[in-house]
Image (cartoon, coloured by chain):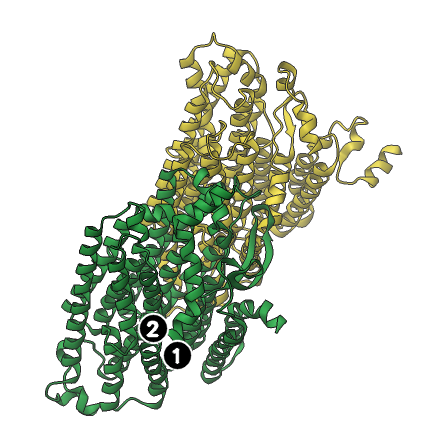
Chain colours: A yellow, B green
Amino acid sequence: MNLLAAAIDRPFIPGWADPANGLRPFAPELWLIVAIVAVLIVPFFTRRSNLACAATALFGLIAALLATMIVGTSDGVVGSHFRGLLVVDPVTVFFKGLLFLFVIGIILMWLCTTSMSMHEGDGPEFFTLLLGATLGMSLMASTSNLLMIFMSVELASLPSYVLAGFRKTHRVGAEASLKYVLFGAVTSSVMVYGLSMLYGLYGTLQVEELAHQMTTGSATSVALLTVAIFGLLIGIGFKISAVPFHFWCPDVFEGASIDVSAFLSVASKGAGLVLLLRILMTLASTAHWHNVPGISLSAVAIVVGVIGSITCTVGNTAAYVQTNIKRLLAYSSIAHAGYMMCALSMLLIGKGAESDLKDPASVATQAILLYLAVYLFMNLGAFTVAGLVYRQTGSEDIRDYRGLGRRSPVLALCMFCCLVSLIGLPPFAGFVAKLNLMWVLFRSGGWWIALIVVIGVNTILSAFYYFRVIRAMYLENSDAPAFFPNPLGLAISGACSVLLVLMLLGWSPLGRMTDYFSHLYFGSATVLVHEQPDMSSATASR
Amino acid sequence: MDFLNHWLLTILIFLPTVGAILVLIAKGRDAIRWTALATTLVTFALSLLLLTTFNWHQGDHYGYADAGGTVQMVQRADWIPAFNIQYLVGIDGLSFPLVILSTFVCALACIASWNIEKMTKGYMCLFLFLETGILGVFLSLDFFLFYVFFEVSLLPMYFLIGIWGGPRKEYAAIKFFLYTLLGSIGLLIVLIGTFLYSRSIVPGGTFDLVRMASPEFQHGLVGAVGHGVAITFFCLLMLGFLIKVPAVPFHTWLPDAHVEAPTPISMILAAILLKMGGYGIFRIAYPLYPQAAKAMWLLIAIIGVVSIIYGALCAMSQTDFKKLVAYSSVSHMGFVTLGAAVMTTAAVNGALFMMIAHGITSAMMFFIVGVVYDRAHHRELSRFGGLATTMPVYTGFSTVGMFANLGLPGLCGFVGEVLVLLGTFQAARSDSILIKGGFASSTQIYWLAVISCFGVILTAGYMLWTIQRIFFGPEKPEYKGFPEVNQREIVVLTPLTVMCILLGILPTVFFFTFTQKTVDGMFNLLTPASTAQVVSTQ
């Protein structure tokens, strides 16, 4: 009876399941699991209706979102749980909030773009897969255990492979799916190889303990360690489509339906970035942001920075020749992942003019979180417009955007706002995100300045291809008929565009919010081994 | 009056945006045009109100009025407190003439846009957004705000050229856009970098342009920023502004943009947008990094001189009337660059005057080209001839405009050119900033001055030749039936002609009284004495 009362009292937190609140940090994921099961059961009563499944998934996601908010505001959940398998800290709360919000957006987008073409009865599978991938991504962002890392990456990847090929009658979809599977299988196996080596070298699965042993121990083979770390980097690099593991990205985006492409463009990359962020920053904080005999942080930072700058350059230059809007946005998403990777290279205390920059982790995290928050809306808006145009014209070719400014002025305006924001120009929030990122790099000084130049040059490169779409929409004419797009889709893309302007005007609250959420939890192992200030309580009190 | 003092600048900036929204609502072509015209005219009238509120005798140094400085009517509000970014607008002698010029030319360009038939609503809307961007650039005193307006003015321009332009409009529009974007990335880097260093001087840092120019701040900045970094920042700033000016070798976007843009947009582009570059040099680049400016003076001066000569030579070889005017802009704006580089009072005054004079004459020239293009539908200089007999009134207006452009004494072009040249010669004197500081030798300066003098002759050459080719010679049969300038065209041409003459014969009344105090105040920042004073007082 008590349990029931408690359940009614705090409906989104299954704290009643365990008197010691053991499951509370896991509440958002639990709601997702409930939603997955519900999506499989509900069709029995609704004749496998797609809409019913969508509604169930939406409810599940909203519940998960609310649970995230409650978890984020409740005391005593920051820390590692289930023997280190699950980490809850402000970063995971923020990322999960964004992720669930984004997937809600994706489902709404699905309603107005691809739901009509989806075969009635395919809903249960589709939403199970979508929610499953979401679950995997949310776990990816909140674990520091090697086994769990591998599990969650696979949990995120396997449904994505199927989602990519979900348009069963499309040849390109099947090709995309196959390509994705092959690429994913190879990189996963390399990753698990690297993880097993790490376990073999240090005998532990916890990243913070690994980091501790890496930075203090000296008896390990550098070559083995390098191979192991590269294996890990390759596995995650595949998820965030870092060059040279980006080849799947354009093909999958082209082959998959537009909602799946949008989902992968933000959610999958975001989760990979947060995972990489956690691993790298744990390592660097254990080494106190300096090179130690065991491991050279500057080498890792340079590798990450160089991969980041190559990624954004390749993404931007390859986008030039694209004629398909989804491929273009795919390369654009590669470039944006590259920008964010540049911030990941802040593993050492910089030599810049700022002497107060003692904690690169929270600075880098803040930059990435803010970028992700803005990037989410830019991409959701742009993909929604692309989806609406596809639904109207049946084409994804940029040539079919000709005259859109006249045929559907509001839709074209939304696309314009999102694209200009993707370039990073005021008066849109993409400018704020990029400026914030450059500012953070500038503060670190030293060779990070080079990354700023890379980002600056890339901005100019990117302007050209984004403007090709704008040019088609406004400067070129076509006699294709005018159309009025689906109001829900228009509302989504319109809301994204308005938000992009508001986020520029409200940079201040946005910055404060990301500042607040930019604290990673580096695990108890660090605290135990080093006589440093108690990180966990410091993080919790923030 | 208090209300005006506080809010007038903000109203000026955002009134065109309100007008743009009204235009969006308006129904019918006439309603749209009249709404747009009313907006620009009201904006112009409000900017004339500045004459009553702006006190040009006030202030003895470059600083805010409440501290006895020249920058007045300041309105500030916190925008992004974490970075100390403010909504900060104000006016001084540097921006005042440019603001009046902008509202004036925008109103005239709006009249000149009367014959735009294609998508009038979109055109007028973008046009008014552009005016907001322009006024924002000239009135904002916060670096971040400046940058936002600087970029915001880019986007409407892209569409105005790209949609309503000539045959190669798409190429011209994207070229304009990418060139300016390249420059603004440089600005962005300096924006972040300067803010970073400002944090070691002011708690929390600042984007306040006036404050960053103050001797106290400069003293700290010299200590915080190494010489090499200062030079890099200065060069990046100059890259951004010189692309906009445009100076050789960054000028190639200009002829394309001008040739393809519709007449009113060419007017705005030449008369106002180019001035953003010049304004940026005087408002940002020189006050923020004066030491680097002195060290780099030779490069800037050479760019200026090359622009003067090369622009004039290019203009001479053009067969397209509009392209000729475009290259003459390059040549004339070279005087602005040169005037900034040599750092004497006369040269800087001349450069500022040149910006206004060129604003008037280039707007007029482009309109003149537009008038003849509307009738002949081509701009080939070699195919014209004998228009003086068919269109005598038009010939009269054009001749005044062209003579003003070539710098005939008594018209506005003359004052600017002469002052810049005079100032350049003065820079060779032993008490000039450059010589005293040991940055230059008088031989270098003499050479530059003498070479740039040839620019005046070349300008006279191509202008007179153009007049001859278009208006004189035997009357050609195909131009026989050309109608004389109509009333609308006279309405545009008359104020411009009047300003050409007034600025030419009464430059002090119409220009230097407004700028005097500000230029003196800014000059004090450049002289080493002021820095030395601060050091000694500390």
Note whether residue A124 is visible. Answer: no
**On screen, B232 above or below B431?**
above
**Mark 2 touches mark 1? (CB < 8 Å):** yes
- Dot 1 alpha-carbon crowd within 10 angstroms: few under 14, some 14 to 19, many 20 or more: many
Q: Residue A467 occupies which quadrant of the picture?
A: bottom left
Residue furthest to the left: B474
- Mark 2 — residue? B267
**On screen, A324 above or below A535?**
below
The percent coordinates of residue A439 (x first, y second) are 48, 42
Mark 2: which amino acid?
Met
**On screen, A523 above or below A433?**
above
Q: Residue B467 occupies which quadrant of the picture?
A: bottom left
The percent coordinates of residue B50 (x first, y second) are 51, 73
The percent coordinates of residue A174 (x first, y second) are 42, 41
**On screen, A108 above or below B155?**
above
- Mark 1 — residue? B108
Mark 1: which amino acid?
Leu
